[in-house]
Image (cartoon, helix red, strand yellow):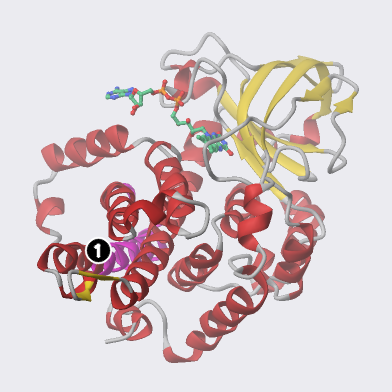
Amino acid sequence: MSAADLSAAAGAVPEERRAIVETVRDFVEREVMPVAPELERNDTYPLELIEQMAELGLFGITIGEEWGGAGLDLGTYAEVTVELVRGWIAMSAVLNTHLMTSFLVEAFGTDEQRQRYLPRLARGEIRAAFVMSEPHAGTDVQRIRTVARPAGDGYEINGQKMWVTNGLYSGLVAVLLKTDPTTDPPYKGMSVFLIEKEGGQTEMPGMTIGPPIQKLGYKGIETVEIAFDDYRIPASQLLGGPEGLGMGFRYCMAGIEHGRITQTARAVGLMTAALEASLKYAGERETFGKKIGEHQAIQTKLALMATNLRASRLLMQSAALAKERNGRADVEAGMAKMFSTEAAVDATRMAMQVHGGYGYTKEFVVERLYRDAIALTAGEGSNEIQQQIIARQLMRDPSVGVGR
Ligand SMILES: Cc1cc2nc3c(=O)[nH]c(=O)nc-3n(C[C@H](O)[C@H](O)[C@H](O)COP(=O)(O)OP(=O)(O)OC[C@H]3O[C@@H](n4cnc5c(N)ncnc54)[C@H](O)[C@@H]3O)c2cc1C
């Protein structure tokens, strides 16, 4: 059974949409794979590839057709992400926060905000970032301190945001801020603002974008800090208008399930690349008079990698379907994200082991896959937090555990 058959069996990628996934696979094999190793090594922003992604319409893939997007379902988007990440995770890094912000604008924005941003986002004319995290608050989002206080006919923002992927080159940043620091629980006093800026600019009145954070992997796409010092923003930039005041945390939690499905798709993409590289190497390298793929210890690794890859893909499709059907999918997305990202770390490590000493060199892709896999376990809600989300729901309703 091919990957496409497997997805079709899970019910999420209908026949007519497979062409889109195949187009992306073709783009990745032709354009991304040949240049990714060098771009990654030099941590180079892949502008040309991003422009090609825009031409393919990928920046509008899940944005509604009425706004110029393709309006595709999450299952198809997830399969497209798998293909992109099979080539290089940066191709998905530039897309994920863009589509999360696009989702927030489409789902919760005012008509004016939708009209103003969605067509340009869908064309990839502007790209978007999304940030909740701060230096002292990642998992514990309710501890954020960056504040937006009413000032004149708008707001004034003070504080610091951390880990803003696409924070420099984006033209729009969705930022979760405190609008009422006195509420108990704190999440009721949070709102999302849409910050427009010039992509590539580091200094704007009241806003400074720091240099890219040096990372182990997940390279090519910048992750930065943004500092606000009396940054003035019009009230029209409050997501959802006056009704959006105090709704930011809830909006972000709905948005982040998209991110968790993306993390799962990235894990599947990395595992696919790891398995392919390992199968190739196991069929070529010889020790003790036979191919290493004929040694049982290597076969065990290949079998585990392939089985966890399929299981992750099915969890990915099940989470995408649940999100499409029910609006929220915290258990499904949490299970998929946790299982697949741990499996990706295991699979990429096994792939390095299959490659022996060569796996530890830049000559083979597996060392990059391993570095990129580790990035997935913390982002979009760490795996420890996914366990808590799943367990909390299980205690309320044991049937979620058996998936009935
Ligand atoms: C490459 C990269 C890109 C990122 N991009 C973005 C972005 O674009 N936008 C954005 O908003 N954020 C982004 N992040 C931030 C990311 O979401 C946070 O790193 C993540 O939420 C974890 O927060 P933290 O790093 O502060 O860890 P902490 O919250 O300090 O957690 C540290 C450890 O403690 C564990 N832990 C915390 N609380 C509990 C608990 N109650 N029970 C058990 N264990 C617990 C965590 O699981 C983790 O293992 C990015 C991070 C990385 C690495």
Membership of 322 in magenta stretch: yes
Residue 245 seen: no
Q: Residue furthest right?
A: 205
Would residue 91 be found to the left or right of residue 3 on screen? right
State which quadrant residue 317 falls in: bottom left
Q: Residue at x 73, y 65 (%)?
A: 49
Membership of 238 in magenta stretch: no
- The reply to whether the residue tagged 1 has its Cβ within 8 angstroms of ligand 1 is no
Q: Residue 354's x, y, as percent?
A: 28, 60
State which quadrant residue 294 falls in: bottom left
Q: Residue 306's x, y, as percent?
A: 24, 69
State which quadrant residue 176 falls in: top right
Q: In terms of secondary structure, where does tag 1 sit?
A: helix
Q: Which residue bears the numbered disc 1?
A: 305
**The N terminus - image quarter:** bottom left
Ligand 1's quadrant: top left
**The C terminus - image quarter:** bottom left
Q: Residue at x 78, y 44 (%)?
A: 169
Is 59 located above or below residue 156 in the figure?
below
Q: Residue at x 51, y 65 (%)?
A: 81
- Judge the density around disc 1: few (<14), some (14-19), many (≥20) Cα neighbours within 10 Å: many
State the residue in front, 365 or 320. Answer: 365
State the residue in front, 137 or 2. Answer: 2
Q: Residue 373's x, y, as percent?
A: 41, 48
Is 159 located above or below residue 276 in the figure?
above
Is 264 located above or below residue 200 in the figure?
below
Q: Residue 343's x, y, as percent?
A: 27, 53
Magenta part of the protein: which range? 309-334
State the residue in front, 275 or 321. Answer: 275
Q: Residue furthest front?
A: 289
Q: Residue at x 81, y 54 (%)?
A: 116
State the residue in front, 110 or 60. Answer: 60
